[in-house]
Amino acid sequence: MQSLALGPFALSVDHLLILIAVAVALFAGWISSRRGGRNPEPALLTIVLLGLLGARLGFVARFSTDYLADPVQIIDIRDGGFWWVSGLATGALCALLYLWRQPDLRRSLSIALITGGIVWGSTAVPLAQIQSSTRTLPDMALMTPTGETVNLRDFSGQPVVLNVWASWCPPCVREMPVLEQAQHDYPEINFLFANLGEDSYTVEAFLDTLGVELEHVLLDQQNLIGEHYGARALPTTLFIGIDGQLQDSHLGELSVASLKDRLASIQPD
């Protein structure tokens, strides 16, 4: 499963696991503080927030050229642009400062951090391995707007970006020019655009109005792709390697920088 939809809200499974780990860490710290010491909740939340800030700034630094071309994108975290290396380093430094300067927090904060880390590591890593090994490019035939039949399995042996979208989805519309340009920038990668639940007339009229030219547009009127990959929200973009295995996924709007980052997982060496 890639995402969950709760009414108008959607959340990727990766983000859900992080929230669960933070919640468990807060609870473990509170329980520990009742046996002596301070409640580490303020410190723990500060560590998490500074870690996220460090992850964002690290990502922006890695793709500074793309972000400087459109500086507003720097604060638009909806593109999912976070670098976990700089985030963990920032969070770890902040935690060490708390443990060094506030002795009465050492026990409860240490327990909270260790517990949260164990919860996240024991769920996120196995889930990623399971998804990669079980979610292969399916033997699935879909129609194009012109009435031709295309089987997804025909793209096996080549890297694939599979974007699931709809014309009524605002973030789908906003990211479309980014994906259109990527088709030309990365000719070695197949970009497939699976429209969810709309007819050929609606799709062609929408693309003409938007003024984008997409190479491989498919109609998925029964949400077959979403069912296969466990994608419950739009837009969802799946990154599939030459072996047909799912290597990465993204829920929400992609920026130029976040797309570049994800493409690295499937580009041939």
Image (spheres, grey):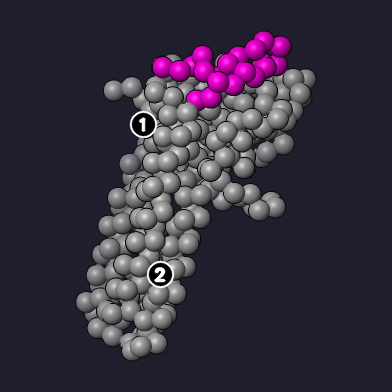
- Which contiguous range is marked in magenta? 137-157
Task: Classify residue 231 by image quadrant.
Answer: top right
Q: Where 19 falls versus 26 (above or below)?
A: above
Task: Classify residue 133 by image quadrant.
Answer: top left
How many residues crowd around disc 2 within 10 Å: few (fewer than 14), some, or many (20 or more)? Answer: many
Tell me the kind of residue under disc 1. Answer: Ala
Q: Which residue is found at the position 70% from the left and 30% from the top? A: 222
Q: Is residue 99 left or right of residue 155?
A: left
Frontmost residue, 249 versus 129: 129
x%, y% of residue 196? 68, 31
How many residues crowd around disc 1 within 10 Å: few (fewer than 14), some, or many (20 or more)? Answer: few
Residue 203 in sight: yes
Label 1, label 2: how far apart the Cα atoms are: 32 Å
Frontmost residue, 253 versus 216: 216
x%, y% of residue 141? 62, 18
Q: Which residue is found at the position 57% from the left and 33% from the top? A: 228
Q: Which residue is found at the position 33% from the left and 79% from the top? A: 108
Residue position for label 2: 25
Q: Which mark sits nearer the N-terminus, 1 or 2?
A: 2
Q: Is residue 235 left or right of residue 204?
A: left
Residue position for label 1: 264
State the SS at label 2: helix
Residue 258 in sight: no
Q: Where 234 falls versus 143 (above or below)?
A: below
x%, y% of residue 117? 34, 62
Q: Which mark is residue 164?
A: none
Tell me the kind of residue under disc 2. Answer: Ala
